[in-house]
Amino acid sequence: MMRKKTLIVLLILLFGVLFVQHTVAARKPMTVRVGKGNAKVNYLDGSAQARTSATQPWRELRVGQILRGGDEVEVAKGGRLELVLPDNSVLRFAGGSVFKINAAPDEESPDVDVHLAVGKSWAKVQSAVGVKRKFNISTDNAVAGVRGTVYRVNAEEDKSVLVRVYEGEVEVSGKSPASADRREEIFGKKPVPIEGPKPVAGPKPITMEEWTMLLKAMQQVVIRPDGSADKPRTFTLEEDRDDWVDWNRERDEKLKPKPWGRW
């Protein structure tokens, strides 16, 4: 009889412990691990380096490594770098390119934003039905946003830009950068002595020329260093061809999904 009572007490205590554990587990908040957006190094010819911020050291890139939003990248002269995004969109950069990944796609947002300081870029964007997102390559004085699939942006040392579209449509917008005087006014400069009580001209309003245009397949626009743009025009495959373009076309063809074979 005593053993039976002891067994009953033990069973009650066991069920009590299990109930408490279940209650605590039910109250514990669920944590979901969210990625920070990424782009994988899929191809690298030559060398390239990256850093997470201006205060961090540079690290050499290798095929298979991951770049994330906020990373700055330099591709060595003569090199070539190909990045693949989670949706299989592709970004490529020629040697001498310097760029920053402002945003890469993750579970929270599919947007892509890359700032190209100097160099050549090529984008092949995968489109998904029903998915709205931004896919921008910006320079110091222009932004090229995808409405299509294949385009390229060249950012030159003198701040001029070339945008060429191969498939789909790309919306290009920009504005004239501030003049040297205006930049000094924004960032500040050391005061200088003024000789005598001479009148000083007051500040003049700075007008910024803003523009937006839509480029279609086989159209291009050239943006001058001052931010103004030429009239868009069509271009031919013959005038466009060079080693950089030929290589990108070969890579695009190689990465194209293969059709199912016959059983």
Image (spheres, rainbow, N blue to C red):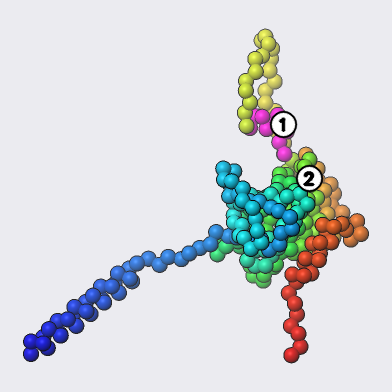
Residue at image location 77% in from the left, 66% down from the top: 252
Residue at image location 68% in from the left, 63% down from the top: 42
Residue at image location 72% in from the left, 31% down from the top: 180
Q: Describe residue 47's horizontal placement relative to residue 53 as left or right.
A: right
4 is within the stretch colored magenta: no
Q: Nearer the viewer, residue 119 or 140?
A: 119
The residue that label 1 is drawn on is 180
| Residue 132 seen anywhere in this rendered image of the structure | no
- How far is disc 1 from disc 2 in space, using C-alphas? 19 Å
Task: Indicate the position of residue 56 as horizontal and vertical percent values.
Answer: 57, 45
**Mark 2 element type:** loop
Task: Indicate the position of residue 259 as horizontal and vertical percent values.
Answer: 75, 80
Q: Describe residue 80's horizontal placement relative to residue 69 as left or right.
A: right
Q: Which quarter of the figure has residue 130?
A: bottom right
Q: Which quarter of the figure has residue 141?
A: top right
179 is within the stretch colored magenta: yes
Q: Which mark is residue 156?
A: 2
